[in-house]
Amino acid sequence: MRLIYVFVLMLLPFLAFSQEEAFYIEFNDENLSDAFTKVEETYNALFSFKNDDINKKRISLIRKKRTLLEVLDAIKATTNLNYKILNNRYIVINQFISETINLNTLDLVVISSYLTKGIEKNSEGSYKLLPSKLGILPGLTEPDVLESIQLLPGVLSPNETATGFFVRGGASDQNRVIWNGINIYHKGHLFGMISPLNPNVTSNIKFINKGSHARYGERLSSVIDISSSSKISNKLRTELGLNGINGDALIELPIIKEKLNIQASLRRSYVDVLETFTYNQLAYKVFESTKINNSENGNNDFSFLDYNIKINYKPNNNNRLYTSFISIDNQLDYTSNETDTNKDFNDRINTKNLGYGIGWSLDWNTKINQTTTAYFSDYKFNYNFITTEDGEQTSDFEKRNTIYDSGVATEIKINASKKNNYTFGYQYALKDVAYAFLNTTDLSFILDSEERIVQTHSIYGQYDYKNSNLFDISFGLRSTYFNELDAVRLEPRIVLYKSISDNLKWQATGEIKNQIISEIDETIISDLSLENRVWRLADGNQFPISNSQQVSTGFIYTKQGLSIDVDTYYKKLKNITALSLGFLNPENSTFNIGQQNVVGLDAFVKKRFNGFNTWFSYSFNRSKSHFNSLNDSKSFNSKSNVTHAVSTALSYKVDNLQFAIGWKWQTGKPYTLAEQGDDGLEFNDGINTGELPIYHRLDFSSTYNFKMSRRHKLKGKVGLSIRNIYNRKNLISREYRGNNSLDDPIELIEKYSIGITPNLMFRLYW
């Protein structure tokens, strides 16, 4: 806590700046989009415009102290575009200012370019990401949603995976990922190293780590709500792309002008045909400490494929409908043999997530809108370890995990006035989750299995009050009935926002959430040991409903390209489960119920100057777990307890060339200390009493946009990214593997970070 106080005191001098109505600003033959970004950051404003209105327009202004109105008048005189200021902050730019403007769609943005252009932070504390407008980020050449989120304060991925990240001390299975209303359970391609969602699909993303809207339930830590574009464009748009691992294609095809269109994307790896250096670096990290890396006579056949389709239909101005489909598929087929015994071994892993969704949005009038949706998500994980001798199968160990998740929902929004808005909704969901461990030799044996169904009925309401002279408040209440568990849970949420001055804002949030589906460590260790966690449902007894309570408060300061965001929080998680491994507690290898307490601080500082954009973030996290039957009933460091994390970056853009370089530094994860005894490893110091070495790495990215021809609309983009430039060998995991039996040896497993990994990208647009 002393560090929190010291850090806040260090930031207080920034608040001493006096308020000015005019600032120095200049444009040197810049495209209008970049000029708008500079105006937003200098005057704490926010522009809304159509890309078609500003394309190919450039502007130059000599350096001079100007008010916002003087800048807008200069832009109008230079570009012949009109402007209109809304609510003293929002500025609409278009060719015909008489066009109808939907004020209800404008969220209150407090920081318009958070890490870079295309990332916004809103007054309720959520983040909005627009991949199509996303500026460059270190280590990334494509606008990957999940990788971009990991650069935000309070988000860490100690294992360097795209999906296995912790948000404010919460476990990775406490993050809910939604695509067009469909729950996504897939952990990512190449066992989490690559995002399961195509980063180039046009979409809007909302990331929420506190103060969730009452419509969001099911998970304790965060929500990533992804919606692909609902815009019906009258122009054909296509893209083709290639990088060091996969190729992809996208298309937006208009069918009926302004009424019907189809969006589709396809992405597939080509590493089963050509293994690049990029893939080999990722694969080496993934398969480290497994027999795939250790075997000299094995053959590993790996591939992944994902595709999605969305159809938008707008029969009239009051009705909008969509239907969508997504498929995410991973395949691994590894074979090896023992020439001495004439035995062949075959490991097969298939991970697949299918999703279907439909939606209907109806405007009853100018103030009332109703949205009705339905979805189905089908997740399957299958692992087989097959032994063959002299051409005949002798055994087959099989692991399965399936999820059938379906639901319907309807929500009504009432925009009563500029100050008062109401939201009411109902959601029904059915989750059917099963897992099984089977072993077949001469006969089939079920080693462990479970299937459980839980139906939930949720009703919720939210009231939003906005008054720029006083304060903004959002209060929501969600009530959920878990049918098979015969349990009811109430989840209140509140967000308070106060604009103290034009530059300084204060925010506080509080929320309660519950979760019935989570991942657990399997009780049977598979031979390959790549996926050792399975999803299961709460049963109300051995696995109760998990609960989270979180409060936070902080301030945001913006002025002349400078942004400061500081937020402190306290989170309490109850009814979390942990597996007591046999070598830690020989008489208890079952699951235990406990709680986790997290206190933390997230701080972010960004400054834009002379075309450069630089930012610095710091996160403090102190997470403790307590289980009555573990560690002599004493609290111990949680696995997510990364006490200090720092990231900083510098980016620059000139015309069509941009680059970014960024550095990450963080303290190591906790691990359980072991000593070598007469009978092998001994554990005498308790759980998670050790800490891994400090982690740090340097990343670089650069992209260049160009036109293929002056006569045609064909455009191109090339990019280069390098992760871990100085090839730091970071120890990211130290764990122990055993079968929970006193007679079995205990094996130490150490895993390291990815080595230096370059990646090239090439895209075509037309």
Image (cartoon, helix red, strand yellow):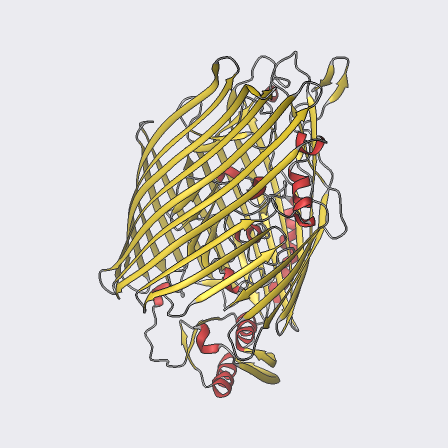
- Taking depth in this image into account, of 602 and 48 the one nearest to the observer is 48
In this picture, is 493 found above or below 657? above
Count of numbered badges drawn on the protein: 0
Classify 192 as above or below 686.
below
Q: Nearer the viewer, residue 14 or 658?
A: 658
What residue is drawn where x is 69% and y is 45%?
A: 281
Residue 269: x %, y % from top left? 57, 48
In the rendered image, residue 748, in percent from the top left (x then y), is placed at: 70, 26
| Quadrant showing the N terminus | top right
* Pick the front one: 528 or 159: 528
Q: Is residue 126 left or right of residue 425?
A: right
Residue 669: where, in percent of width, then height? 66, 37
Q: Quadrant of residue 142?
A: bottom right
Which residue lies most toward the front here? 391
Q: Residue furthest left?
A: 364
Q: Is residue 376 visible?
A: yes
639 sits left or right of 312 in the view: right
Q: Is residue 14 above or below residue 424?
A: below
- Seen in the picture, residue 298 relative to 249 is either above or below; the reply is above
Report x, y in % for residue 549.
Answer: 46, 39
Q: Quadrant of residue 30?
A: bottom right
> Residue at point 46% right, 55% down?
265
For the question of whether residue 165 can be seen, the reply is no
The residue depicted at 56 percent of the width and 25 percent of the height is 385
Q: Tell me what residue is drawn at x 48 percent, y 57 percent.
A: 201
Q: Is residue 313 left or right of residue 350?
A: left
